[in-house]
Amino acid sequence: MSQKQEEENPAEETGEEKQDTQEKEGILPERAEEAKLKAKYPSLGQKPGGSDFLMKRLQKGNYKSLHWSVLLCVDEMQKYFDSGDYNMAKAKMKNKQLPSAGPDKNLVTGDHIPTPQDLPQRKSSLVTSKLAGGQVE
Amino acid sequence: WVCPGHCEPLSWCPAGRRACTDIISTVEFNYSGDLLATGDKGGRVVIFQREQENKSRPHSRGEYNVYSTFQSHEPEFDYLKSLEIEEKINKIRWLPQQNAAHFLLSTNDKTIKLWKISERDKRAEGYNLKDEDGRLRDPFRITALRVPILKPMDLMVEASPRRIFANAHTYHINSISVNSDHETYLSADDLRINLWHLEITDRSFNIVDIKPANMEELTEVITAAEFHPHQCNVFVYSSSKGTIRLCDMRSSALCDRHSKFFEEPEDPSSRSFFSEIISSISDVKFSHSGRYMMTRDYLSVKVWDLNMESRPVETHQVHEYLRSKLCSLYENDCIFDKFECCWNGSDSAIMTGSYNNFFRMFDRDTRRDVTLEASRESSKPRASLKPRKVCTGGKRRKDEISVDSLDFNKKILHTAWHPVDNVIAVAATNNLYIFQDKIN
């Protein structure tokens, strides 16, 4: 990676050296920033690729993109599992102070947020043919 | 970068600033570069047209003036899911021109629309069955027939929606791309990519679906997608994990399995909490030649050779100084900003935006780069833009600006480069800046 950067700036001698040291120090600023963040929000998850990060991503403009509602039919009664609310509630329980993301759009509806464990098993739906969905042959 | 026949690098001068009522959310030149379309947060599309060479106003050449304005999308409400659907225009893509009218696709989060923009400069007069003001004439009073004649009128530009492609996306549409076959186009949301025919609105084919059976297993989302400029069977899509997949529609109907997989190997020892977030690709663009593609992640722009999947051939740092600010950028959500990038007509230069109304240009041939600012102060006509510099160390020189003084609310997410000439359009929040090179 540093070699590529050297090729890109052949004319600037000091630039080259600067970039080399920055390369080595480049790892440190990021780690220092991570430490800062962890100090502020100790319960922030280790792996940002999981639901915490994606929920954070969802909050930024597209916050509702992955907000899905699973409609379950159990005899006469219908229970709704809203994963967005569930994840927000989960995050709130783990961590009192969430990084602010502007006006709070994810208001909890109702007093009780159903968890996946609360809901009865879902009946398997009929497997729909991909042809029905309009798949090209 | 050097213009052939000249030794000095190009200097950019302001060629106009257009204030828009709302935040600009997309900018796109058409194939000839004569038209420039902008979409905004309020669902409006404004099209600018380049002024022709005019002897009486020699400096007006290259100016872009408003050609047409129309409301493309309105806010909607999804009653089933209790969700608001924003009217913000996410992307505009022009169709190649085939007749006197111009066509473009505009999309918000859920619905894509095909708009026809046509000119009317003649009006028919002398109808038999109706008066000049449109009232029907009494048929018994008509004693003679006349042939209506066409009379010139003030130019009127009309925009009409010709097709509405709706209800095909569960998640938010982030990209649309017109195919080189000029008959089909793709639309991509966070988890799926659909293929449409421009004539058919009630059906679309799903060509990529990365939604896992169990949503708890979701680890990445689609961030951008584009068709190859010449090969109508090839398209690419980028992900939030910094990878790009190239797919060939000839291999199978559902392109869940890629033909090529582009990913830069990461040094595991340098991994941090932010690594994945900043590696998320916010934009992917093929070069005009079709040989390369460019990706934009949070801190850099990378050029990839389609023949080499293992790593990019070029990496250009946009604002590396932000690496030591990632904590606060995460807190204020700026780390999730989606910057776009673009090529110039000859693929010799690339451009992308940054903060503080700065934008960066990289010349691939001379390896030079420059930081410029889109602001009213630097917009004196015919005066070249002065390169800007961000100071990272302790000692700040007179014209430098320190990292801590950068205004992170002034972000340039959308830029566009004229397909042929050295004319660029830069969207800075509510303002559209147009710059052109002095030699032009």
Image (cartoon, coloured by chain):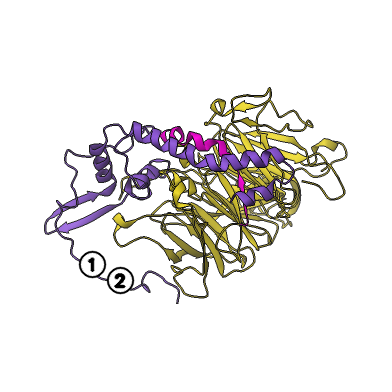
Which chain is drawn using yellow?
Answer: B
Question: Pointer 1: what residue?
Answer: A125
Residue B315 located left or right of residue B9 = left
Q: Is residue B53 above or below residue B406?
A: below
Q: Chain of mark 1?
A: A
Residue B294 position, x and y percent, is 60, 54
- Tell me the CA gap for discs 2 and 1: 9 Å
Q: Residue at x 74, y 36 (%)?
A: B15
Crowd band around label 2 with a 10 angstrom C-alpha radius: few (<14), some (14–19), many (20+): few
Question: Pointer 2: what residue?
Answer: A128
Residue B16 position, x and y percent, is 71, 35
Crowd band around label 1 with a 10 angstrom C-alpha radius: few (<14), some (14–19), many (20+): few
Q: Residue furthest left?
A: A76
Quick one: SS at disc 1?
loop
Quadrant assignment, res B181? bottom right
Q: Main secondary structure of the magenta part?
A: helix
Q: Which residues are magenta?
A: B313-332
Question: Does the residue at mark 2 contact the one at mark 1 (Cβ under 8 Å)?
Answer: yes
